[in-house]
Image (spheres, rainbow, N blue to C red):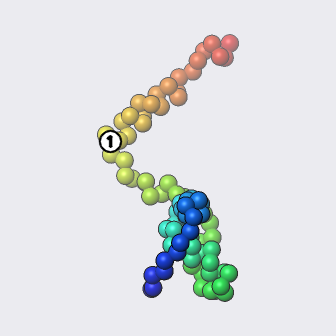
């Protein structure tokens, strides 16, 4: 594979990064996916057309120490405010 330098405005780069992040793919893969059909490159670049879950990269990475404050912050979620239901 060869390297290619691409110059663009910061807003364009930011939008491309957001697009790639939303699909859970690299910026390079996103750019290939966008450009390939325009230049007639027919090889399918991804095996699935479904957007990928961009949270998958975080799966299984929290330690117990990381998780403790998250669980503590959610304790109020299970409390019922009786005054609101009368």
Crowding around mark 1 (Cα neighbors within 10 Å: few <14, some 14 to 19, many 20+) is: few
* Residue at image location 66% in from the left, 87% down from the top: 40
**64 w.r.t. 51: above or below:** above
Q: Position of residue 3 (x, y in %)?
A: 45, 81
| Quadrant the N terminus occupies | bottom left
Q: Position of residue 43 (x, y in %)?
A: 60, 85
Query: Would residue 2 be seen by someone viewing this image from the given angle?
Result: yes
Q: In the picture provided, is 70 more to the left or to the right than 52?
A: left
Q: Nearer the viewer, residue 37 or 59?
A: 37
Q: In the picture provided, is 86 more to the left or to the right than 29?
A: right
* Residue at image location 52% in from the left, 57% down from the top: 54
Q: Nearer the viewer, residue 12 or 73?
A: 12
Task: Determine which quarter of the picture holds residue 35.
Answer: bottom right
* Residue at image location 47% in from the left, 31% down from the top: 74
**68 w.r.t. 7: above or below:** above
Task: Determine which quarter of the picture holds residue 8.
Answer: bottom right
Residue with the mark numbered 1: 64
Question: At numbered mark 1, what does the secondary structure look like: helix, strand or loop?
Answer: helix
Q: Nearer the viewer, residue 68 or 31?
A: 31
**18 w.r.t. 44: above or below:** above
Q: Position of residue 52 (x, y in %)?
A: 56, 62
Query: Would residue 19 be seen by someone viewing this image from the given angle?
Result: no
| Quadrant the C terminus occupies | top right
* Residue at image location 65% in from the left, 85% down from the top: 39
Q: How many marks are shown on the rendered structure?
A: 1
């Amino acid at each position: 594979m060869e390297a290619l330098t691409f110059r663009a405005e910061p807003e364009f780069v930011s939008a491309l990064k957001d697009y790639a992040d939303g699909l859970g793919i690299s910026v390079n893969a996103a750019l290939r996916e966008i450009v390939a059909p325009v230049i007639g490159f027919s090889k399918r670049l991804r095996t699935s057309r479904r957007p990928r879950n961009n949270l998958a990269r975080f799966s299984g990475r929290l330690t117990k120490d990381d998780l403790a404050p998250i669980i503590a912050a959610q304790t109020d979620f299970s409390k019922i405010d009786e005054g609101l239901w009368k």
